[in-house]
């Protein structure tokens, strides 16, 4: 089945540094990928929609200059948290729609990245 | 305002019983509704999708119902097992795209 690989699974960084998270579709092409953020015991909050070959679409309240998204190929989207601060510590998860469909399509999720900013 | 509500309290049941989880929504007109399973520290895994014109969907020990009048979906796990312990999320969309909005999830604990 369709697999989405996310790397790294966890990262600890110092305040003020930048962190890049990669999301790859391993056996299918994903023109669209979604980036979510999840706080403990809370639901997934959509941050942005990554579109291959064009600019990402950000949800209201998400700073595009802080959360840089690049979708340079049909199998790779990256999220860079710039100038990270402790409040950016969270669980970040990417997903891509099933390759067989676009409408009504289930999402395939990566296993998430636990970011801790000290 | 739009809301997707799942019981935030954990559901504890005995192995072998049927677990029933509820998803209620307001101010949405979803074309379809999905259920996912999420284990701690992992990404969600898709389980079932049900369309607005479907009343019920089954997959092995799983059953989902969708009542667009009550604006509610029920998720059932029959003959529950300890391995079914996880958080279950419902998600729905309100337009033609793939942008899903997730409920807060309900944690299920199945005791042996």
Image (cartoon, rainbow, N blue to C red):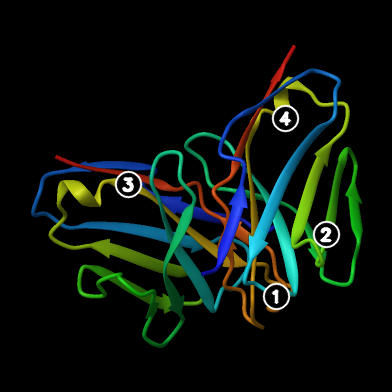
Count of labels in the image: 4
Nearer to us in this view, A41 or B42: A41
Nearer to us in this view, B26 or B83: B26
From the viewer's perspective, is A54 left or right of B69? Answer: left
- Report x, y in % for residue A104: 72, 73
Read off the residue under disc 1: B29
Quarter-wise, where is residue B75 in the image? Answer: top right
Picture layout, residue A53 above or below residue A116: below
Residue A90 circle label: 3
- Image depth: mark 4 or mark 1 in front: 1
Instruction: Compare marks 1 and 2 and give the one earlier in the sequence.
Output: 1
Picture layout, residue A109 above or below residue A61: above
Residue B66 circle label: 2
Q: Secondary structure at mark 2?
A: strand
Read off the residue under disc 4: B84
- Image depth: mark 2 or mark 4 in front: 2
Q: Secondary structure at mark 1?
A: loop
Tell whether label 2 touches label 3 (CB within 8 Å).
no
Q: Residue furthest top?
A: B112
């Amino acid at each position: 089945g369709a697999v989405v690989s996310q790397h790294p699974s966890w990262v600890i960084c110092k305040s003020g540094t930048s962190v890049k998270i990669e999301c790859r579709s391993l056996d299918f092409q994903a023109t669209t990928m979604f980036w979510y953020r999840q706080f403990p015991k809370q639901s997934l909050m959509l941050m942005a929609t990554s579109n291959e070959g064009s600019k990402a679409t950000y949800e209201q309240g998400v700073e595009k200059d802080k959360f840089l998204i690049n979708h340079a190929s049909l199998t790779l989207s990256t999220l860079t948290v710039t100038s990270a601060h402790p409040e950016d510590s969270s669980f970040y998860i990417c997903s891509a729609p099933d390759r067989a469909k676009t409408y009504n399509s289930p999402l395939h999720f990566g296993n998430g990245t636990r970011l801790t900013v000290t | 305002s739009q809301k997707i509500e799942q019981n935030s309290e954990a559901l504890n049941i005995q192995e072998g019983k049927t677990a029933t989880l509820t998803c209620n929504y307001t101010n949405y007109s979803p074309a379809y509704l999905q259920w996912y399973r999420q284990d701690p520290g992992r990404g969600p895994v898709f389980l079932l999708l049900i369309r607005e014109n479907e009343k019920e969907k089954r997959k092995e020990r799983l059953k989902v119902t969708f009542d667009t009048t009550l604006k509610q979906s029920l998720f059932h796990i029959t003959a529950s097992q300890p391995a079914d312990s996880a958080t279950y999320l419902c998600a729905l969309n309100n337009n033609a795209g793939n942008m899903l909005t997730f409920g807060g999830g309900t944690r299920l604990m199945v005791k042996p």
